[in-house]
Amino acid sequence: MSQVRTRFAPSPTGFIHLGNIRSALYPWAFARANNGVFILRIEDTDVERSSQEAVDVILEGMQWLGLNHDEGPYYQMQRMDRYKEVLQQMLDQGLVYPCYMSTAELDALRERQMANKEKPRYDGTWRPEPGKTLPPVPEGVKPVLRFKNPQGGSVVWDDKVKGRIEISNDELDDLVIARPDGTPTYNFCVVVDDMDMGITHVIRGDDHVNNTPRQINILRALGQEPPVYAHLPTVLNEQGEKMSKRHGAKAVTQYRDEGYLSDAIVNYLARLGWSHGDDEIFSRQQLVEWFNLDHLGKSAGQFDEAKLRWVAQQHMKTADDAMLAGLVREQFARHGVTLPAALQTGDKLTALCALFKDRCATTVELMEWLTMYVQHLHAPAEELAAQLTDVTRPAVQALAKRLESVSWEKEAISQAIKDTLKEAGLKMPQLAIPVRLLVCGRSQTPSVDAVLALFEREDVLARLARA
Ligand code: GLU
């Protein structure tokens, strides 16, 4: 087999959301799985609706998710000369023809067809045929160019998701491939690009299935064998609607800002339409090893926030602590928090990430946990009053006294806690809960000795002094 070449071809007409970027992830993974080439092509010919901002979200989102491209980004607007060159070539070869039918005539044709209960389609008035006399060319009218679609027979392809699809050529009329001003139309640009870029596998949303037979016919007319097609079912939102900005979908980059690990998003999106046995949690490396087009799902994937959070938690648990520390530091900076000196260098923050990451789905949640190490968070007064009683207060004070002089590490702190409990005749929660409320501002944390050991001693003593 020749080298695999795939592409992602977004239109930058709105910010890209998770549903869209899945159409980048699959061709990327397929290219990587086959030592192939992944190409990024920006389909920006809808000048009115395309924006640089939308392009930026695509580039940033892909970079964040690690979906790096090997070629491109190509911009269709920069390839106009090439499209016009191919148009001219097709005109010279008689594969396309000028059509002078006016909009009014087309409308009248459509109305006649509808009245006769026929499917509206171009009737071939200007299509040249041997022995046929064409109408006189009207003056001052600029023609569109139409593709001479094959007549009779059908277009067949083996879709990697949908199976065999056969469309009769009688269903397809002669497509307009250039407007009166000479600009090429959408389907034509896609065909020229897929041809020039040597695309072997087109993996894209199934909203393009209807374009495929037309694209195959044009490709064949140009002497090309069509690529393999895989048309991915839509991604639905939690309400079961097609995921879209209008229906509240977030830009991909927002998940980065909310602190999701990119590996978690890649894992989640990969499963939303593809499977490898029962595996739910896998690394990017595993995805690239396993990905193929034989296990693509046939039904629409539905976004599920709870599942995303679960996947995200699993990735947090196994994430490298130093890497997390770097991300948490970025989150603090984004939230305008200056870290105390002790947390500015890596080790302390790394140890904190190791201790708290099991409780989090995102680095923002991790940052929220670690805020107690940056500032004194006060527990609700009633909660503290309920826990800091005449029975427990003396024990907290006795512990504080011990902590003034123990060596400042987990084991020694643990021993100080045990000694205090023994002396006071109390159970662990009777001491640990008020200590947590005073020091951490909350009653539940990982093991209290480990939590305390990562504070500065004077901070712990100052906070316990409020007992
Ligand atoms: N530009 C199209 C879109 O954003 C994709 C075209 C294609 O993949 O062929 O829907």
Image (cartoon, helix red, strand yellow):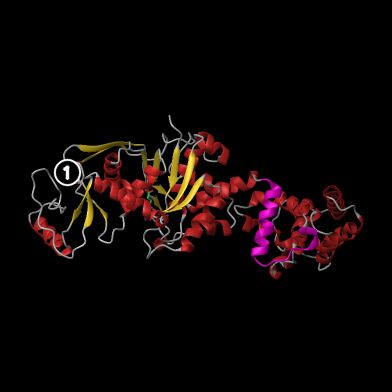
In which quadrant of the rendered view does residue 281 lie?
top right
Residue for point 27% across, 46% down: 90
Judged from this view, the residue extending furthest toward the top is 1
In which quadrant of the rendered view does residue 375 lie?
bottom right
**Predominant SS along the magenta part:** helix
**Residue 400 percent location from the top left of the image:** 86, 60
Judged from this view, the residue extending furthest toward the bottom is 381
Magenta residue span: 320-344
Indicate the secondary structure of the residue bearing disc 1. helix
Residue designated by label 1: 170
Relative to the observer, which residue lies in front, 23 or 241? 23
Instruction: Residue 432: say if magenta.
Output: no
Instruction: Residue 321: say if magenta.
Output: yes
Relative to the observer, which residue lies in front, 167 or 453? 167
Residue for point 90% across, 52% down: 407
**Residue 398 percent location from the top left of the image:** 88, 60
Look at the image and tell me whether residue 383 can be seen. yes
Judged from this view, the residue extending furthest toward the right is 405
258 over 320 or under it: above or below: below
